[in-house]
Image (cartoon, rainbow, N blue to C red):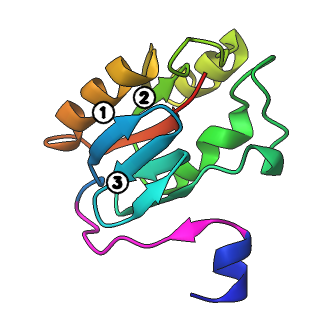
């Protein structure tokens, strides 16, 4: 890995035809197929990366920003799964949902465990992307 890859939380994935599956989830920890272990992830067709909230100014409130989903769209996601955290503390503003819907993106919003279930199911057949927060 390069310094930039370490700095920006980039992780690789070699199957460009599908999104990596979430293999394991527990409080504050996710394991993702081909990517390893981390706390929060952005996953999309062909890859993924650690989700660094500071890059877009994301906080639990007001929640997931439009900038957060751009990586998913730029990498070909036609369906997006947004997790609200294990205790639903991460908000998903209506503006973010509308941003996706205006681009004809199907959006699923759910607590993290349910979001992972939805995402993994969709990853088998769909160009899906997801934002996952593995704690609160």
For label 2, the crowd category at 10 Å Cα-Cα, with few meaning under 14, some 14 to 19 and many 20 or more, is: many
Asked whether the residues under the numbered discs 1 and 2 touch, taking CB atoms below 8 Å apart as contact, a structural biologist would say yes
**N-term-proximal mark, 3 vs 1:** 3
Task: Look at mark 1 in the image and give the residue it sits on.
Answer: 119
Give the residue furthest to the bottom.
2
Task: Look at mark 2 in the image and give the residue it sits on.
Answer: 81
Residue 47 appears anywhere in the view: yes
Looking at the image, residue 129 lies above or below residue 52 = above
The magenta stretch is 8-17
Q: Position of residue 131 (x, y in %)?
A: 52, 37
Q: CA distance from mark 3 to mark 1?
A: 12 Å
For label 3, the crowd category at 10 Å Cα-Cα, with few meaning under 14, some 14 to 19 and many 20 or more, is: many
Looking at the image, residue 11 lies above or below residue 52 = below
**N-term-proximal mark, 1 vs 2:** 2
Task: Look at mark 3 in the image and give the residue it sits on.
Answer: 32
Q: Position of residue 72 (x, y in %)?
A: 51, 47
**N-term-proximal mark, 3 vs 2:** 3
For the point 14% across and 43% down, which residue is it? 124
**Residue 40 magenta:** no
Secondary element at tag 2: strand
Task: Determine which quarter of the picture holds residue 24.
Answer: top left
Relative to the observer, which residue lies in front, 70 or 43? 43
Image mark count: 3
Quadrant of the image containing the N terminus: bottom right
Number of the front mark, 3 or 2? 3
For the point 74% across and 72% down, which residue is it? 7
Q: Position of residue 9 (x, y in %)?
A: 63, 65
């Amino acid at each position: 890995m390069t310094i930039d890859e370490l700095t920006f939380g980039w992780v690789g994935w070699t199957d460009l035809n599908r999104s990596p599956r979430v293999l394991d989830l527990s409080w504050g920890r996710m394991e993702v197929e081909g990517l390893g272990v981390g706390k929060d992830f952005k996953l999309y067709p062909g890859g993924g990366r650690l989700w660094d909230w500071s890059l877009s100014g994301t906080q639990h409130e007001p929640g997931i920003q439009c900038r957060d989903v751009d990586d998913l769209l730029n990498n070909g996601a036609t369906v997006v799964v947004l997790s609200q955290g294990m205790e639903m503390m991460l908000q998903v503003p209506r503006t973010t949902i509308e941003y996706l819907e205006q681009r004809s993106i199907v959006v699923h919003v759910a607590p993290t465990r349910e979001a992972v279930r939805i995402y993994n199911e969709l990853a088998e057949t769909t160009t899906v992307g997801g934002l996952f927060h593995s704690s609160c």
